[in-house]
Structures are given as C-alpha cells and as structure tokens.
Image: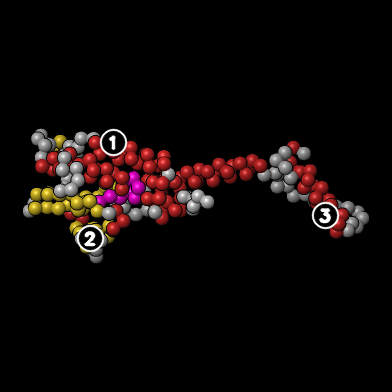
C-alpha cells in the first residue's frame, strides 16, 4: 500500500526519485548549500600551477554575487552542485557581450548532450539553444566510468554499491547455511522397491541436510 519500492534500477533510470529518500535528500541539500556559500576565487594557469588573480575581476563578482539576472550566486551554485550530485552533470550557458562574460544561464541537465563531430571536435546539443560550442558551456561533472567527458550520477552509483553489498552479505549467509554437497551412494544386496528408495533418501536428507550436516 506504500507504492512502488525505490531500488537501484529505478534510481539509475531517474536519479531524481532518490530525493524521496530522506537521508539522501538531507545529504544533497547539505552538500549543495555548503558549497554554494564557500567564497570563490578566479585563478589562471601559471606554468604548471595556478595563480589567483590579484584583484577580484568581473568574473569573480559573478561567481560570488550575481551570475545572471534572476539568481543570486548562492542559488546558482546550489542548482549546479545539486544537479552534479543527482545526475552527475550540470550545465550553464556562457552568455557573452563581445569578449566579456555577461551571464551564466543554467540549463536543465537532462536537456543537454555531449557529442563529437566528424573532425573530433566536442560540442553540446541543448533543447533550448540547439548546438552550442564546447567553449560556450560551463560543465560541472562528477567522476565518470562509462563515457568520456560525462559524469555518472553519484546517487545511482551509490545505490548500486549498496545493493551489491547487500547481495554479497546475503550470499555469505546463504553459503554459511548451505550443507555440504556430498555425493553418497547406498548399495544393497537385495532388491528394494521405489518406496524404500524414497524412504532412504528422505531419511538421509532429514539427518544431514542442515547447517550442522558436515558434523554428522
């Protein structure tokens, strides 16, 4: 009477359903909100390392205050991090005015796909904006194990890991309970009927087919 059970297969098909599990919802909310409030700095590559900018640039202001016209930085970061945790990927369109970054426009993660063209150049397809060059998409992704450049849902991966651990535990219990698989041959000089054969088999099973069977 409580509806369909949420299992690993259902979460893999639609990771958003996992947010109906209270501990998962609380974990995602906590991580997303905490990371959304951490101050961000802009760095550029210097040799083999990275160096922070001396003075906050317009991009740093966007990251910490106003990434677009309708969201605060906290709202935008929470959206991006939540989608990474749920779907494994999150996207924002980089809107520019000339060469200057003007806005980060959030996209629905299930409306974006990553592709390669005939010249092996990466590009994205989006439901709202069509084909978009890779340099015009801000793509946050979780670790990926099945597809290059694409993150796997940590929630779905975690659910499958939990199910696998449960199955392994149950397999161990079943193996412990299983009696020894001995092969026994009973031979007699005189002929016995089918009923007596079945009685001998039933008697053997009743005596030895228990978890203590090897001790007998």
The disc, 1 or 3, on the residue closer to the chain's N-terminal end is 1
Residue 213 on image: x %, y %: 74, 41
Q: Which residues are magenta?
A: 84-91
Residue 141 on image: x %, y %: 29, 48
Mark in front: 2 vs 3: 2
Q: Residue at point 23% right, 35% down?
A: 38
Q: Residues within 10 Å of mark 2 (few under 14, many from 20)?
A: few
Mark in front: 1 vs 3: 1
Q: Which residue is mark 3?
A: 198
- Disc 2 is placed on an element classified as loop
Cα–Cα gap, marks 1 and 3 = 69 Å
Q: Which residue is mark 2?
A: 128
Q: In this image, 64 relative to 147: left or right?
A: left
Cα–Cα gap, marks 2 and 1 = 30 Å
Q: Nearer the viewer, residue 94 or 72?
A: 72
Residue 135 visible to the viewer: no
Q: Residue at point 84% right, 52% down?
A: 199
On whether residue 89 falls in the magenta region, the answer is yes
Q: In this image, 194 relative to 28: left or right?
A: right
On whether residue 47 falls in the magenta region, the answer is no
- Disc 3 is placed on an element classified as helix
Q: Nearer the viewer, residue 32 or 193?
A: 32
Give yes or no for contact between labels 2 and 3 (Cβ–Cβ under 8 Å). Answer: no
Residue 34 disc label: 1
Cα–Cα gap, marks 2 and 3 = 73 Å
């Amino acid at each position: 009477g409580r509806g369909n059970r949420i299992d690993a297969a259902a979460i893999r098909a639609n990771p958003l359903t996992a947010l109906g599990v209270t501990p998962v919802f609380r974990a995602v909310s906590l991580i997303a909100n905490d990371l959304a409030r951490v101050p961000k700095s802009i760095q550029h590559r210097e040799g083999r390392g990275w160096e922070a900018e001396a003075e906050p640039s317009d991009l740093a202001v966007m990251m910490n205050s106003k990434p677009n016209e309708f969201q605060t930085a906290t709202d935008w970061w929470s959206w991006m991090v939540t989608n990474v945790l749920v779907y494994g990927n999150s996207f924002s369109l980089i809107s520019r005015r000339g060469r200057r970054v003007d806005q980060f426009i959030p996209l629905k993660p299930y409306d974006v796909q990553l592709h390669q063209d005939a010249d092996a150049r990466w590009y994205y397809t989006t439901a709202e904006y069509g084909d978009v060059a890779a340099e015009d998409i801000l793509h946050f992704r979780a670790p990926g194990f099945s597809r290059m450049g694409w993150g796997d849902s940590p929630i779905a991966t975690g659910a499958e890991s939990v199910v696998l651990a449960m199955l392994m535990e149950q397999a161990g219990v079943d193996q412990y309970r299983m009696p020894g698989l001995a092969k026994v041959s009973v031979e007699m000089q005189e002929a016995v009927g089918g009923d007596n054969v079945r009685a001998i088999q039933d008697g053997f099973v009743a005596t030895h087919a228990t978890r203590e069977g090897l001790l007998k």
